[in-house]
Amino acid sequence: MDVVTIGETMVVLTPESSPLMRYAHSYSRKFGGAETNVAFGLTRLGHQVGWISKVGDDEFGKSLLSFVRGEGVDVSEVKLEKTAQTGLYFKEVRSGDNVRVQYYRKGSAASTMSPSDLNEAYIAKAKYLHITGITPALSESCYETIIRVIEIAKANGLKIVFDPNLRKKLWSEEQARKVLLEIAALADIILPGVDEGTFMFGETDPETLGQLFLDQGAQVVILKTGAKGAYYFTKDEMQFVPGFKVKTVIDPVGAGDGFAAGVISGLLDELPLEEVVKRANAVGALATQVVGDFEGLPDREELRQFMCEPTGEDISR
């Protein structure tokens, strides 16, 4: 197995008859979660991924589990929880730059995850552990689970990829800052946005933020600047890699998860860091071209066609 990820995936209800929920009378039902978005992005690029989580022992949970399995993700470590329901959220896509999300996830099945749910032998099979800052925000037991899975990963030689994925609606800013900094200090590869770096350190300059994350102990920091592109930092080098232009952003939700999938895919393929970030920029851009959290994530041929013209010329310029 190449990657194991852990976190909550929920039912997503999106108004169809009107972009505003107050006027909507019909909804489409999909699924969404940062960790499975990354998992889908990786499986479409040919990598083997396992997902650890809990879902409710209800119709939504069973449907979700079947769907994730159908995307090629191993779900053998996902448990059905009889005492809690599958979480859900509503997403209003008003325009490409105006998306509103309302969560109904408190007390969900995934929020009951605990360290006892972890199978060390399963995790040890992977090369990379992918985690986000969302999971520790769900409950104290989820926080303890993330700390424990990091310990297991370190003991078994996995590289830890951490996307802060800040969700201010889930916890207080003080607690969020404390925990995100704690996890950042334990990760090998960190994928923050500039806004998240500013939240964590109070700085706005990308180069300063990159150095601060390295000082925390990371080996690689890849700092996202939205559509413009991303910087990467190691102890020996720093470089900015420009993004890929798209005519219109249809749905920005999931672009960061696509970016993370591109990073991990590039690392698994042992590409140079510049090419890793270039791939990540491309996957993130493609994710914005389709309504949905993961539907726009490409396979290898789609990615190749997007990144290069027939002559092989980089179209990001």
Image (cartoon, grey):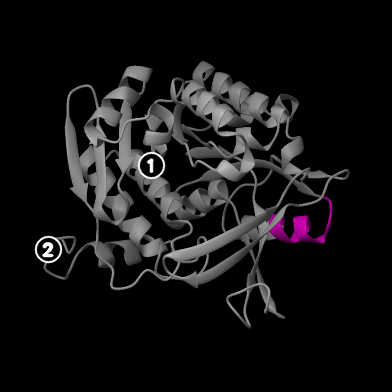
Marks 2, 1: nearer the viewer: 1
**In the displayed structure, would residue 65 be above or below residue 231?**
below
Q: Secondary structure at mark 1?
A: helix
Kind of residue at disc 1:
Asp
Residue visible at 45% across and 57% down in the picture:
44
Kind of residue at disc 2:
Glu
Residue 131 in the figure: left or right of residue 110: left
Q: Is residue 55 at least partly visible in the picture? A: yes
Q: Is residue 124 at least partly visible in the picture? A: no
The answer to if 64 sits in the magenta stretch is yes
- Cα separation between marks 2 and 1: 32 Å
The answer to if 200 sits in the magenta stretch is no
Specify start and end residues of the magenta stretch as a single range.
57-65
Point out the residue furthest to the bottom here: 17
Q: Quadrant of residue 100?
A: bottom right
Which is more toward the observer, 210 or 259? Answer: 210
Image location of residue 16, percent across then percent down: 62, 79
Q: Please tell me whether the stretch drawn in magenta is mainly helix, strand or loop.
A: helix
Image location of residue 187, percent across then percent down: 44, 25
Image location of residue 135, percent across then percent down: 61, 37
The residue where tag 2 is placed is 313
Q: Secondary structure at mark 2?
A: loop
| Circle number at residue 195 | 1
Decide which of tag 2 and tag 1 comes sooner along the chain.
1
**Is the residue marked by circle 1 packed among few (<14), some (14-19), or many (20+) residues within 10 Å?**
some
Image location of residue 141, percent across then percent down: 72, 28
Which is more toward the observer, 193 or 254? Answer: 193
